[in-house]
Image (tube, rainbow, N blue to C red):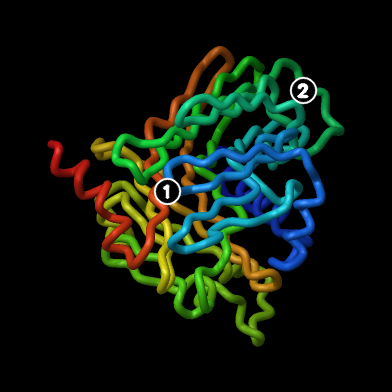
């Protein structure tokens, strides 16, 4: 019961906190005045990280161009549900953190947080939760392998992990021509998740969508997905064959600033001293349509 409560309250809190006041695409360009960034190029993809928080600020590729662009206060990379008795919707996330340790080497970059920061600073939180995210150039010459490790050194349980958490995705061309595709599903999130002008019912949030990725659900027959436009896009899939309950893919759209958040949601029960590892997520920015982005996923399936 508490897991679902965390899902409803915790994810909503994270989404609303990230959504509030996020700048338009033009305003986002102002972040370049802040020199505290680290940039790395993996294959053809340029990635810009906030040097203080470790969050993902920008991602671009010659095919689709800029696919993600945001400001530090509305950026992410990892986000955790960390309910406590005094405040159940409490989150720990990269954007609330300071002193991220970013290490670059040939073909990869890693971000380590000794202590992920909380969404509220009013509470005494004994112990800490640490995390490491690694982005590595894949051997296929085009993809990026994303992995995450979370260690709980506190008495409170971690109930949910959002990873990868891609906050700040932009439309790839016209809004109506940017498509989200997975299995039998084809949507245009920058249009279909926009709140109708006549919608005033507080209990329904049409800007939010969830897709089960167990491999058994009709909404996501496989775990591969693609977000793309006429000139290119990005594909994502986890390297996992097991018939399990995750991850779940969630989308959240803010029509006021035309940004999309794509989250892979993992429900966990991470007690003190426990470790959670994501396994490999393969992210493939690509030129052309989705058929270019699905090639690494198809090659992986054929390995079996």
Please identify the residue farthest to the bottom as the structure is shown.
Answer: 198
The residue lying at 58 percent from left, 75 percent from top is 194
Query: Helix, strand or loop at disc 1?
Result: strand
Q: Earlier in the sequence, mark 1 or mark 2?
A: 2
User: Which structural element holds mark 2?
Assistant: loop
Is residue 86 in view from this perspective?
yes
Left or right, 224 with respect to 20, comes to left
Cα gap from disc 1 to disc 2, whole angstroms: 29 Å
Give percent across and percent down for residue 139.
31, 35
Above or below for 11 versus 104: below
Q: Could you tell whether 53 is left or right of 167 in the image?
A: right
| Picture residue at 37% right of the left edge, 34% below the top | 280
Left or right? Give the position of 252 relative to 212.
right
* Residue for badge 2: 125
Q: Residue at x 41, y 65 (%)?
A: 232
Question: In the rendered image, which quarter is residue 35 located in?
Answer: top right
Which residue is at the far top? 273
Q: Which mark identifies residue 119?
A: none
Q: To which residue does mark 1 refer?
A: 248
Where the C terminus falls, by quadrant? top left
Residue under the point 46% across and 72% down: 178
Between 227 and 93, the one nearer to me in the picture:
227
- Mark 1 Cα within 10 Å, few/some/many (few <14, many 20+)? some
Whether residue 1 is visible to the viewer of this picture, yes or no, is no
How many other residues sit within 10 Å of disc 2, few (<14), some (14-19) or many (≥20)?
A: few
On the image, the x and y values in percent for residue 26 come to 73, 68
Q: Which is more toward the observer, 8 or 96?
A: 96
69 relative to 144, above or below: below
């Amino acid at each position: 019961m508490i897991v679902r409560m965390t899902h409803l309250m915790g994810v909503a809190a994270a989404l609303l906190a990230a959504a509030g006041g996020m700048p338009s695409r033009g305003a986002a360009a102002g972040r370049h005045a802040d020199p505290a960034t680290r940039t790395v190029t993996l294959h053809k993809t340029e990635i810009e990280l906030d040097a203080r928080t470790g969050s993902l600020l920008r991602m671009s590729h010659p095919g689709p161009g800029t696919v993600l662009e945001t400001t530090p206060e509305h950026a992410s990379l990892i986000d955790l549900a960390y309910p406590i008795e005094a405040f159940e919707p409490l989150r720990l996330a990269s954007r609330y953190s300071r002193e991220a340790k970013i290490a670059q080497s040939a073909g990869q970059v890693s971000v380590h947080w000794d202590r992920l920061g909380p969404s509220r600073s009013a509470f005494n939180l004994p112990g800490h939760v640490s995390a490491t995210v690694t982005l590595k150039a894949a051997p296929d010459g085009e993809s990026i392998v994303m992995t995450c490790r979370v260690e709980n050194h506190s008495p409170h349980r971690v109930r949910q992990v959002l990873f990868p958490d891609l906050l700040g995705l932009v439309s790839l061309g016209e809004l109506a021509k940017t498509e989200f595709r997975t299995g039998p599903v084809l949507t245009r999130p920058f249009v279909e998740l926009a709140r109708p002008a006549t919608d005033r019912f507080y209990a329904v949030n049409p800007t939010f969508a969830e897709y089960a990725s167990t491999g058994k659900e009709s909404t996501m027959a496989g775990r591969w997905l693609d977000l793309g436009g006429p000139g290119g896009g990005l594909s994502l899939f986890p390297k996992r064959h097991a018939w399990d309950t995750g991850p779940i893919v969630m989308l959240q759209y803010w029509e006021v600033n035309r940004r999309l958040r794509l989250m892979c949601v993992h429900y966990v029960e991470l007690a003190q001293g426990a470790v959670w590892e994501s396994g490999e997520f393969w992210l493939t920015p690509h030129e052309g349509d989705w058929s270019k982005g699905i090639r690494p996923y198809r090659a992986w399936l054929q390995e079996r």
